[in-house]
Amino acid sequence: MTPRKSTGKKSSSIKIPIRDQVSAGGVVYRGDPGNIEVVIVSVGSENRWQLPKGLVDKGEEPEVTAVREAREEGGITSEVVQHIETVEYWYVGLENGIRVRFHKRVHFFLLRYVSGDTSDHDWEVNEARWVPIEDATSQLAFDNERRVMDQAHELVG
């Protein structure tokens, strides 16, 4: 076997920076067992349906973020009942115009509706609506959020 001759070129392997990112959100519900509704929100140009969630601010507890995001994205006030699940995944996005690989963790909570109207959502959301919990899972865009919704359904009936 003949050894390879070096071309003098170095291999160019560009490393994408990695960032940790933590979000929180939840399944906001109202009603009685057998007649439960939950809030889902439509975001983006493709009108993707998902659970209200967002980045945890510095010094903020995930439970506080979940309630804040339900208020901002869902237009409603809620209170934490319990933690459902923390999901984890990777995605590539931009940070200050630079391509970055994000390691994301999202803490999901079961949230009980207190007051408010879904029409009072913020600008980030195309629409927020109440849907029967039986229908919500099939409307959500992400597998991990469908799993969270199924768990919420088991918890509240």
Image (cartoon, rainbow, N blue to C red):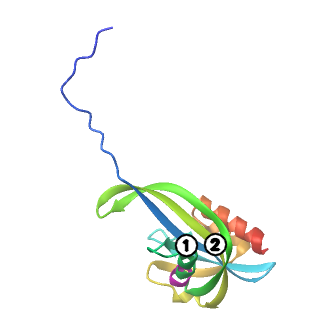
Q: Nearer the viewer, residue 84 or 129?
A: 84
Classified by dominant secondary structure, the portion drawn in magenta counts as: helix
Q: Is residue 156 among what the camera can see? A: yes
CB-based contact (under 8 Å), mark 2 and mark 1 = yes
Q: Is residue 24 left or right of residue 131?
A: left
Q: Is residue 69 left or right of residue 130?
A: left
Q: Is residue 138 among what the camera can see? A: no
* Type of amino acid at the residue the image marks with label 1: Pro
Position of 82 relative to 85 (above/below): below
Question: Residue at (22%, 21%) from the top-left corner?
Answer: 6
Question: Residue at (36%, 56%) from the top-left corner?
Answer: 100
- Assign a secondary structure to mark 1: helix
Q: Residues within 10 Å of mark 1 (few under 14, many from 20)?
A: many
Q: Quadrant of the C terminus?
A: bottom right
* Type of amino acid at the residue the image marks with label 2: Phe
Q: Which residue is mark 2?
A: 109
Q: Which residues are magenta?
A: 69-73
Question: Residue at (58%, 67%) from the top-left corner?
Answer: 107
Tell me where residue 26 appears, x and y as whole percent. 61, 73
Most extreme residue toward the left is 8
Q: Is residue 86 magenta?
A: no
- The image quadrant of residue 50 is bottom right
Give the CA distance from mark 2 to mark 1.
9 Å
Q: Which residue is mark 1?
A: 62
Tell me where residue 106 appears, x and y as whole percent. 55, 65
Tell me where residue 110 appears, x and y as whole percent. 67, 74
Question: Residue at (81%, 78%) from the top-left corner?
Answer: 34
Position of 37 relative to 14 (above/below): below
